[in-house]
Amino acid sequence: MTRSDLAKALHEAHGGLTYPSARRLVDAVIEAVCEGLVADGHVVLSGFGTFRVVKRKPRLGRNIARGEKVVVPSRNALVFVPSRNFTGKGP
């Protein structure tokens, strides 16, 4: 599902909301989630799940073309843990 799909679903579910307004609303929610991840490192959406930023350690990888070992640097990764009562089914 894409941002456009989310905006379209929101527009269809709420008849008084125009598509451009739904698009701005979806963008605002995503922006707020991103800001929360940057500021706090986690965002909890009750009944849906938790997004967390975790630090991946550097590791040893392999360049398949040359067969040589390379160091993969540390990086931040986003992890999603679904809520216990999240079924993945609609309402």
Image: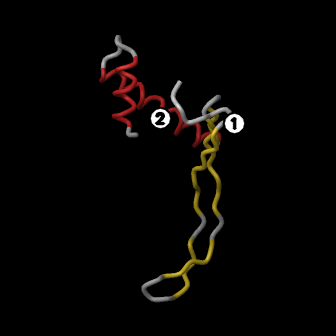
Disc number at residue 30?
2
Q: Quadrant of residue 16?
A: top left
Q: Are marks 2 and 1 in contact (CB under 8 Å)?
A: no
Residue lying at 53% horizontally and 32% vertically, measured from the top left: 89
Q: Position of residue 79 (x, y in %)?
A: 60, 49
Q: Quadrant of residue 69?
A: bottom right
**Along the polypeptide, which appears first: circle 2 or circle 1?**
2
Residue 66 placement, left or right of 45: left
- The residue lying at 56 percent from left, 72 percent from top is 72
Q: Give x and y (percent) for residue 39.
A: 61, 40
Viewer-closest of 87 and 77? 87
| Whole-number angstrom distance, CA of label 2 to CA of label 1 | 23 Å
Amino acid type for the residue under numbered disc 2: Ile
Q: Mark 1: few, some, or many residues within 10 Å (few <14, many ≥20)?
A: few
Colour mode? secondary structure
Q: Amino acid at mark 1?
A: Arg
The circle drawn on residue 84 is 1
Secondary structure under badge 1?
A: loop
Mark 2: secondary structure? helix
- Measured from the top left, where is residue 24 in percent x and y? 37, 26
Q: Residue at x 38, y 39 (%)?
A: 2
Please name the residue shown 57% across and 50% down the image. 78
Q: Quadrant of the N terminus?
A: top left
